[in-house]
Amino acid sequence: MLTPFKEPIYVTRPILPDLDEVQNHLKEIWEAKWLTNEGPKHRLLEEALKKTLLVPQLSLFNNGTIALLVAAQALELSGEVITTPFTFPATVHAMNWGGLQPVFCDIDPLTMNIDPDKIERKITPQTTAILAVHVYGTPCDVHAIQKIASKHNLKVIYDAAHAFGVEIDGQSIGTFGDLSMFSFHATKLFHTVEGGCLTANHREIKQRIDLLKNFGIKNEEEVVLPGINGKMNEVQAAVGLANLKILNEERKNRSLIEKTYHYFLKDVEGIDFVERHSSITPSLQYCVIRINKNRFGICRDELHQKLKEFNVLTRKYFYPLCSNYPCYSHLPSAHKNNLPESNLAAEEVLALPFYGELDLNDVEKICRLICSFQKTKELIGIS
Ligand SMILES: *Cc1c(COP(=O)(O)O)cnc(C)c1O
């Protein structure tokens, strides 16, 4: 008999650094009386993250959404930006706040990333950029996207909020396109409570970004750009420095949990995982399954509800679809007929509990629960 968990099992829990370590940093910050505006902790974290993410240029931010806003300004985008509806609200909202028109392009059903084969037909004389998302850390088809961008003279921004540490054949995900944004929100693999960064390949663009995130202030006499306040403070940077030390441990644990989910669920009729090519170093940001209603016997929403009754709090991530929000559904590109794969994915995806502290026995029990709700075939791999 499977019984409900006594305590709720959340979809994620933030990594928490050693408190003494944070306190040591705080003491130094207090002594220096330097709380924000590119202080010593900020500089240390920027250098450390450049090494961790293997990128030539990196600018820290107070959050990932502001970083996206600044990315659009730094690249002087105007008019239309082709993007995916299958993402977190911030991706599309940031373009809207920047005065840009989002144009939705459907996704590839296997990777759930923007489908490069469908991008070109969305290009108009007003298009200035492609904003693609590495959904769940699965890399976009960066080479196909760059080819289209180069041919049509478009900029490329990647929302790499899920892709911390991802590499393609050993090359950092943060080196593709013109700019990449990483989020360091508490729910992300690596976090600074709130925070984020932009990564780039060239020094000139980093200098422009650093001006834009500090009101465009060049010096005491000159304000040269219409900037915003995007600065990461010293306390955020201190948490980041301490978190970097526990990141590998978290990754190791998550890797085991992912293997356990795969072991118990991969052969279950109606459940699909996102396939990962062997050339990819994963982020381990999320563990997401797709539920095919016909093959599994019940739909994703029903599974989500049944798991909730057993105190397992999964998330329908990403549902609702951005193109179906009232603020975007009127756009011609938002029509459901143009976005069949995105609309289907939003109905089928389910993010499973996934964080390093999650007990492997609990993972096994979650898998048994999921299998017990299946209504079609014999349970596979589970007695
Ligand atoms: C978390 C997230 C963001 C926003 O980042 P914040 O740091 O919370 O502002 C943007 N895009 C995606 C895909 C995200 O998951």
Image (tube, rainbow, N blue to C red):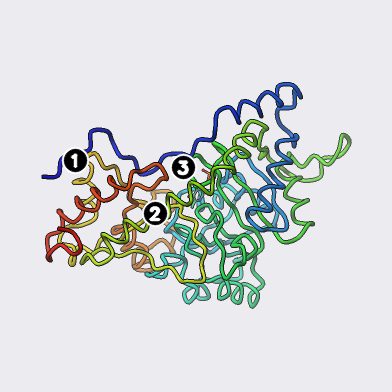
Q: Is mark 3 within 8 Å of ligand 1?
A: yes
Residue plotted at (70% across, 22% down): 30
Residue assigned mark 3: 187
Q: Quadrant of residue 349?
A: bottom left
Q: Earlier in the sequence, mark 1 or mark 3?
A: 3
Residue 41: mark in rendering: none
Of residue 188 and residue 210, the one placed in the foreground of this image is 188
Residue 321 shown left or right of residue 223 in the figure: left
Q: Could you classify mark 2 by the number of other residues whose Cα lies within 10 Å: few (under 14), some (14-19), or many (20 or more)? A: few
> Could you give the CA–CA distance between mark 2 and mark 3, rounded to whole angstroms?
19 Å
Q: Give the amino acid type for the residue marked by disc 1 in the picture.
A: Glu
Residue 326: percent from left, percent from top: 39, 49
Quadrant the N terminus occupies:
top left
Residue 197: percent from left, percent from top: 63, 48
Residue 364 shown left or right of residue 117 in the figure: left
Residue assigned mark 2: 256
Asked if the residue at tag 3 contacts the one at tag 2, i.e. Cβ–Cβ closer than 8 Å, the answer is no
Of residue 255 and residue 202, the one placed in the foreground of this image is 255
Residue 223: percent from left, percent from top: 82, 40
Residue plotted at (72% across, 61% down): 201
Q: Give the amino acid type for the residue marked by disc 3 in the picture.
A: Thr
